[in-house]
Structures are given as C-alpha cells and as structure tokens.
Image (tube, grey):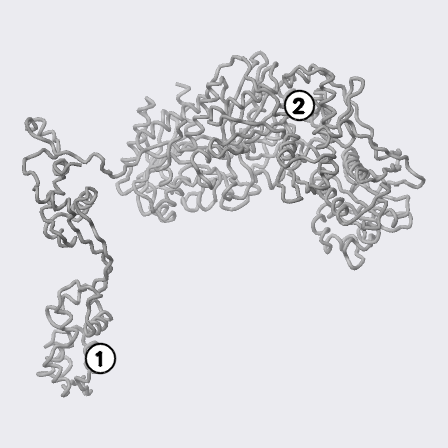
Amino acid sequence: MNINTIIKKLHPLEIKTLSHLKKEILFSELQKNTGLKEVEITRAIQWLGNKNIITIDEEIKELIELDKNGVKYKKEGLPEKRFLKATRSKNKISEIKKEAKLEDEEINICIGSLKKKAAIAITKEQELIITLTEQGKKLLEKEFLEEQFLKKDFPIELDSLKPEEIFAFENLIKRKEIIKKNVKKIRTIKLTILGEEVKKKGVSTKEVIERLTPKILKDKSWKNKEFRAYDVSINVPKITRGKRHFVNQAIDYARRIWLDMGFEEMTGNLLQTSFWNFDALFTAQDHPVRDLQDTFFIKKPATGKLPKKEFIDKIKNTHENGWTTNSKGWQYEWDEETSKKNVLRTHTTCLSAQTLAKLSKKDIPKKFFALGKCFRNETLDWSHLFEFNQTEGIVIDKNANFRHLLGYLKAFFKKMGYEKARFRPAYFPYTEFSVEIDVLHPIHKTWFELGGAGIFRPEVVKPLLGIDIPVLAWGPGFDRIILEFFKINDIRELYKNDLKQLREIKDWIK
Amino acid sequence: MPTVNLNLKVLEKLIGKKLSLELLKDRISMLGTDLDKIEGNEVVVEVFPNRPDMLSEQGFARALSSFIGVKTGLKKYCVKKPLKDYQVIINDSVKKVRPYTACAIVKNLTFNDEKIREIIQIQEKLHVSLGRNRKKLAIGIYPLEQIKTPITYTAKKPNEIRFQPLESPREMTGLQILSQHPAGRDYGHLLEGKAVFPIFIDSKNEILSMPPIINSHKTGKINENTKEVFIECSGFDFKSLNQCLNIIVTALADMGGEIYQMELLYKKKKIITPNLNPVEWKLDLNYVNRLIGLKLSEKEIKILLEKMGLGYENKKVLVPAYRTDILHQIDIAEDIAIAYGYDNFEPEIPNVSTIGKENSFEVFKRKIANILVGTGILETISYHLTSINEHNEKMCFKSEVIELENPSTSEYSVLRSWITPSLMQILSRNTNKEYPQNIFEIGTVFKPNTKEETNVEENSRLGVALCGPDVNFTTIKQILDILFSALDMTCAIEETKHPSFINGRVGRVFVGKKAVAYIGEISPEVLEQFNIEMPVSCFELNLTNLIQVINNK
C-alpha cells in the first residue's frame, strides 16, 4: 500500500498513538503519555502492527510492587525503626507503642525482629521493659537494608536485584502486605522503517469526518469534507445469532426431499405398545429384539390397550399359522398380554404399520414418509446413542416392485448428496426382500452402511391393509449422514448442546 | 448378529474353488451375509438370524459354493434307516419341563482338535440363535461308543439326579449342578423352581446329560477317538428341534459322516428323525416376476434357484430340510433375487402420481421455531430421557414422571414431563460460555393418562429460557408477546404459584379459557441447584393445546 494511502486510512486513535511513538517505548509509558484508555491503546497498536508501522515485542517479567503496608512504611518508616527510635526516650512497652504509633500486631513483629538483631534487651515487670543495647544504638545510626529497599522506585524487575537487595526482598516478601511479586507482560513498541517514514511525513491535519452522525447529515456539514478512510479488511468483533439446531436443519432438508418426491408425512407417538412396534410387524414374540437389553420398556404404565379385536385376531393368526396370507407363520402360541407391553419405539416402522391399518383401499397408490426419533437400549459411547433419528418411507402400489424400491432409495440419497448407492441382501423380520443400503462417501470414496429397506412381508400387509399388495418400505438411520456433513466424530456431540458449538457450527447447506 | 469363524484353507477346499480376496469379500456380502474381517487364514462372517444353516463352516461353504456356481442345486444327503435299538423312549414326565426331543446318530467320523472345536462352535451358535440361549432348544452330542441304546428321555426330582457333569472332578446332584457348576450358574434359571429336571439315560441306566444345562463327563464328551455320535435336541417346539437337528447332521455328513435315523417313541406315536426330505413349494412365476420387476423364464428361474441350493422339479421348488426361513413363497422369490444379484438390478422410479403433504402440526412447529430464531434465540435438542434428580429435585418441583423398566443408567431413567428442566441443564453446563444465553427447544413431554392407547399422553411443548445479567420477567414476556402477535393471537396472564419460580413473578398464560403456558423468573433456589449465577426467565408453552385452540377458532 502506498504510504499516503496508509496515512489517509489512519484511525484517530492510531494518529494520536503515532504522535507519541519514538524508536522504542514501553507500552505502559506510551499509555501514560497518550492518556488513552488501555483498550483504546491496545486496539491502536494492534492496527498499527497490522500495517507494519510498528513491531511489538513481548517479554514476560517478574515485577516487585509495593503492597498496602509497603506504601505506608515507605512514607512513615519501617515499624521496627520507629520502635527503635522510640526506645531512646521511652522503655515501657505501652509508651513505646504510643510514641512510635504502632499497632499491636506490629509490636510483636518489631520485638521479634529487633531481638534477632540483638538490638534490644527485654525485662518483665508489670509490663515489658525494653532497653537499647550497644548494637541497637549502632543500628539506629544507619539504614536497614529493608529501608533502603523500600526507598527504590517501584515496580522493580526481580532479575535486576543486587545480592543485598535480594536479602531485603526475601525478608520483606515474608511479611504482611509490604511487597508483592507480579508476573507482567512487558510490551515494547518499536517503530519500523515504514513507521519512521510515516511519522516523518507527518499525519495530515486536514479535518476529516470520523463518524457520520445524524447531526452531520442534518446540518449538511459533510459537504466538501473528506471522510477518513477505513481499513476495510479489518477484523471486527463477533456477534451471535439465533438459529435452528443443526440436526433439525438436516431433518427439514430431508423432509423437503420426500415432499418433492410426492410423499405424505406420517407422525405419531414415541411411546407405543409392542403390538404396533413388533407384533403388527410380524416380529415373533420370542425374537431377541424384544429382550430387555435391546428395547426400553416402561415401569408404569407397563402396558397399553390393544386395537379392535378384528386386528388382534388377524395378527394372532398370522403369527401362529399364517392366517390367509399363504404363510406358515411362526408356529407358536401368540400371547395377547405380551403385545400390550409399552415400549419406546425402536423404529419409525410402527408408524407405517399404523398408516396401513388406517388406509382406505380406494386411496391407493399412496406414498408416505416419516422422520423421527427412535430408541434403543444402548450404553452411551462415542458411536452409540440411545436416541437416534430414522427416516421412514412406504410406497403402497399394486404395481410396485423390487426395482422401484431401489429407485426411490437411490433418488433420495442422491438428493442427500450421495451420488452412488449400493444394495446388499439383508434380513429383517418384517421385510422380504430385505436390503442393506450402502452409499459411497463422496470424498473418502469408501462405502458406508446407512440401514435397511425392503418389501413388507404379506404377513405384515394383509392383516393391516386387508389385501396383499407390495408395500415398499425403508427406514435407514439418519444420524450418520448428519455426522458426516458436520464432520462430527463423537455421536454424543449431536445433543451435547454446547452453546459455543451451536453458535459456531456451519449451517446445513445442500 | 451371530458370527461364524472360518478357516480360509478349509473353506476353499469345501467350496471347491479358490477365490481372490476381493471377489470372496464381494460374493460373501452379495449372498446376504456380512464379512466382519479376514485376518490371515481366519475369516469371520456375520450370518443373519434367518439362516442358522450357515452357522457352520460346512453350511456356509455349501451356500457359497452353490452361489458362485461351483456345486449348485439341491444337495442330496443319504439317510440310513434306524438300526435295532436306535430308539429313544420319551417318558411322559418330561411334558411339564421340556416336552420334546429329536435325535439322530452319525457314524464314520474322524475327529481331531480342529473338528471338535468346530462341532462345539456349531452347537454354541445354534444355542444362541435358533435356541434363544438354550431356552427354546438345546443340543447334546455324545460319543456313541460310551452309550448303550436304547436311550430314555425322562424327568426326575433334582435330588434324585446324580452324575459327574462335564469338566467337574466329582458327582453332583441336579440342584448342586445348578448352584455350583459354571454351566449351571449360566443356564440354571431355565430349570429353577421346576419339580423335575429332564435327563437322558442309556439302557445301562447311566445318565448322559441334564438338558439344557450340561452333559455327563463320562458319557457326554467327544474326543479324538470318537467315531460315532448320538445327537439330541431338546426343547419346546418339535418343528424347530427337527430343523436344528437337520442343520447339525448335514454339517456332520459334510465332514464325512453317515447319518442314521432314530425311532422316537412318544407315548402316543412313533416318529422317525431326522427327516431330510426336501419340502415342496408351489411357485407362482408371475408373482415372482411381478415382485422383482423382471421377466425371467422358467428356465432362468430354475438356474437361479439352483444357485441358492434349492431344487426345481415338475413346477415345484424343493427346499432343503435345513432351511428354516422359508415361510411363504415370497421367501423363495427373495432367494431368486439374491441369486440374480442385487447389484444387477436396474433401479427404476415408476411414474406413479401422488401428492406430497407435510403434517400440519410439523408445519406449525417449524413456523414457531422460525419466529424464535428471528428474535435471536438459539435452538437446542435434548434427550427425552433424564434423571429424577435433574428433572425434579433440582427444579424443587415434584412432577409425575414415567419411569423406564430397564434403564441402562439412572442418568437416563425417566421420560421428561416438561421442557424447562432440559433447558436448565443446558444452561448449567454452559456457565463458562458467553452471555447472554438465550435458548429454546420444541419437544415431546410425557404424562400418565388412562384415556390414551398407551396410558401415556404425549404433548409437544415449546420451552424458551433467557439467561444473562439483564434478564427478567419483562424480557421473557416480550418474547411471548412477539410470538402471540406473529400468530395473530392474544393471551392473558394470571398470577399463580409454582415452586420453580420466584413468588409473585410467575404467571399462567391463557388463551380464552384454556391454560397454555407458564411464564416467570426461575427462583434462586433452583438456580443454585444448577450452579447458575445468572438470572433466568422462561416460559413453557403447550403447542398441542395451542393448535387445538387455533383449529377450533
């Protein structure tokens, strides 16, 4: 940047600071000389530094400063000196105290310190009688090392002390609030060659407009004046904003994709009876997923109510012998009580079951989706959460087939940003065909697993819908995609609600 | 999911072809199993629970070999008729405790350490999967050389049962086995409290085992000298017992064994097991083609079926006796699709016209969220599960909560009944972050209600909390006002009492006559509990109620 441009863009704080700069100056001195507030001068030197007008050297130093009592003693003299002086005319302790103007606390310290120096002798009568020794008389005539030390100009750098000063320092630092040690950053500001030039060239004194105010606009005083130019590349303090949680941003995006593809939204309760969560989905009552270690059950109310008898009978028969679905069924005795057990839904597929049960045949073909929380009895760790998001979809269409299933899924994941999807055989109790969906990570070029899909078994569809037609169904997990997008490695961070993270995390932009 | 450990060398021999690792990996996953890892010679594969027949090295190789086209079609196993005395007499006393057994004998075996481990692996995997941890069924395998047939399956009082269980130095009674033997401690709950325990005895009156717990050390341990074995499966469902038996005997036959049937003498009828005759299924070729979206000819379907180890003769599908997963012809259709290769299907989006529709309540909730975002507030999402301490004790308010029957930790053991405790927890964890901290959350809360299907009512609530040095009743009321004016609604506030809020600074918000929210300043007692040294004001609005009011307008 041209030197004139630099000069033109200087902020008033910079101009003021610059006028007090010399080849080298301490920050504290500069502040004193300019009379600016610390925050103002800090900003000014930071800006000047950015423009290479100055360099700032920082040095960490240990400084000795006077404390409360130190300030007092510097003025009035050390208590022990005052004590000693008083013993020239008085020797009863109470009188000494009065003469030397000492506090009780100080008296004890004085006696201790002077006895150690063999400056006084003590006898005890009704009260303590102090007499000055020969040594004491000598001491009276010269200055204590501590006195000399206190006379110095504070703050003093610890490193600069002479040996006898170190002795005095160590004695004083032990005593109450006389001196204290502080760690300080010493900043030295030096003008660079550019800085010397800027200073030499002199800062324009022509009047410029600093802040555009309503007054200036009203009185039109801006006319024929120049504005001080800003450094527009400058960093400004950060502000915060309101925003949606990043998980909800992602969910809203997925919702829009399903809507674009002509799907209707399903919603429902998080708490469900086992009937809807398992039995209606042809999951045998002794299936391991219905164990305590996989599914959350409720203590009270432990059970809920079953739907109308027509449904119960159909489901019971389907489990036991296949009913009229042409299936053999699971061939066991289905228990009504087991299906009343309340559970936190383990998948959104229970919503699909409820939708099929409510659907009128004349509305077919139909497409539905759901996005929702599900629960799994997991111990929390970096890759497991007991609450997770699933995206559910069903297509009820008498002409639907396996290739359509793959087509819908591929289209969805493409819109989610995954160009390539692959399908592997899988197993779920309620689908046949069953499919595992993998997508290709666009950057790492590795496949990762997103979850399951399939065609609902006739044992699921016929009892609920009344007819046996293909129902395409899927319910891949959604959290993995969110983690990938936001580059989060620990799944617990999804719902940590760290406000710094929530404020700073990028938005879902696809 | 159950896994099976395979030795690559043995596997290659059984498959009859050497595959590159890449191809092996690919074929394994396209067969409908999941490759866990390959390390040196060890291959670990996850098998889906519907295919227990693939849980042995032999069974897995059989499926894979056929899938890659080496040995396709229905595999025939020779089953010999029972010899004299190859009988199992089932005493009626087992009815009350473990009613059924299915048995077989396999001869001409040669065992070494590896094969014994293999047999134990099959047995254990089947126990876990098909057997539901031995509850539904359990398997026993015995050296026939140590046993004199016929065998009796009966039940006796626990104290009358006495034998030396496997790997134990001494004899024990039935009850002692349950309390002292490691297998007894693991599976004892399956017999606990029963008046009689089931046992197998041979004709010398020697106890062979006490299912489903443990075999006898003397007569129930296979070693390298064993050439012939007696196999029994015991349990509650005769059909599953047969399937399990078929899986084991075919695996042993693939090791070189000869299968012999046994006569099971139940009280009322005689049954002969194992029965390895394939099950016949009618297959509607149109149904298959319609479902998979292809136009395959009968000939093509036959070839595909054979790739899955099934047979096709006279328009009928022959399903091998070890396949337990075929319940409906759709299961056969899936096998055809797997044989065709999921990777060979062309995905297609059909031209089906339907109209997309968002749930109106979700639309409403999103509107509310966007209004709040516009006021500069940050949205949070909390778990629905919390602890009674965070939810009730710290809020100084005893709210009725729904408890989990089986929480994994007390930290997450109850379902929240209001949102504000979640917001307080968030503020409590963020006291080192910049203020003001203004947050909101829209989420589900739970409370008992016998009118509901689950006896629990779920509501959507909005919680808003403002936290910072300048926060008070006015600042939160301003947010509530903005929200109501955006919704073109008015509300009235009446003073109320609530232990979580400062007395005299808490109100109930009404729309018409319906109470929809609480609003106020959180009391210092509560703030102290959460270690928050900043004032908090908040409101909690029942959106389920609010939408009802709006819809009834």
Give the x, y percent position of residue B109. Answer: 84, 43
In this view of the protein, which residue sits in the foreground, A471 or B172?
A471
- Is residue B107 at all visible to an observer of this figure? yes
Q: Which residue is at 46% across, 22% downward?
A: A257
Which x, y percent locates residue A510?
41, 26
Above or below, A17 relative to B376: below
Same chain for mark 1 and mark 2? The answer is no
Residue A216: x and y in percent read 8, 29
Q: Which residue is mark 2?
A: B340
Q: In this rendering, is residue B488 above or below A439? A: above
The quadrant of the picture occupied by the N terminus of chain B is top right
Closer to the camera in the image, A398 or B450: A398
Left or right: A257 as drawn, with respect to B291: left
Residue B438, labelled with which disc? none
Residue carrying label 1: A112
Foreground residue among B335 and A316: B335
Amino acid type at image mark 1: Gly
Q: Amino acid at mark 2?
A: Tyr
